[in-house]
Image (spheres, helix red, strand yellow):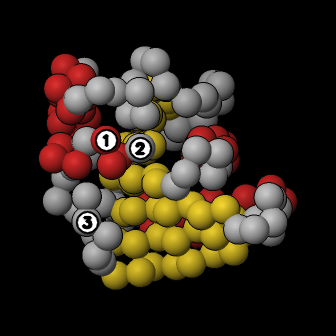
Amino acid sequence: MHNTGVQKASIKMSSLADLPAAASVLLEAIAQEPVILFEGPMGAGKTTLIKELCRQLGVRENVSSPTFALVNEYESGEGNLIYHFDFYRIAEEREALDIGALEYFDSGRLCLIEWPSRIPDLLPEHYLLVQLQPDTDDAARTMTINQV
């Protein structure tokens, strides 16, 4: 996974109250790129951000991290499929291949990928990279969006 690209936005979130605005900025960027990678340390808020993003997209079902299933499928309010991946627990890229990750990534559907650093050789050529970094204040986060 490369960290080069054009920076689209950097947003400071002081608390969870800032999450809807941050997700809204991310939604604007998603219009250009359906594959979104979420990186950040454990507990940085990747799944929490994805939950808010899905809420704004009109997803009605429960959004949770697919840590053991590797992929969850949701439907947006407009009837579009959204795929949510969590590769934290995989031991090798073969596990992602076995679930058809490449087909999902090439589907043109929105793909939200947590822990993409576990599958560097399978990532598409173009994607949005969302990096979440906790600040010294436990509730504060910085979200940086880059087009790669």
Residue 34 locus on image (x, y percent): 34, 53
Residue at point 81%, 66% (across, down): 137
At 45% from the left and 43% from the top, the residue drawn is 114
Q: Quadrant of the N terminus?
A: bottom left
According to the picture, the residue beneath numbered tag 1 turns out to be: 118
Toward the viewer: 82 or 116?
116
For badge 3, the amino acid type reads: His
Q: Residue at x 49, y 25 (%)?
A: 67
Hey, which quadrant is residue 13 in on the image? bottom right
> Where 82 sits versus 30, above or below?
above
Q: Disc 2 to disc 1, how far (Cα)?
A: 6 Å
Nearest the eye: 148 or 77: 148
Q: Is residue 50 above or below residue 84?
A: below
Of residue 77 and residue 38, the one placed in the foreground of this image is: 38
Whole-percent x and y of residue 42? 58, 44
Q: Would you name the residue on which mark 2 appears?
A: 115
Q: Residues within 10 Å of mark 2 (few under 14, many from 20)?
A: many
- The image position of residue 121, as x and y in percent, is 15, 47
Mark 3 surroundings within 10 Å by alpha-carbon count, few (fewer than 14), some (14 through 19), many (20 or more): few
Q: Is residue 7 visible?
A: yes
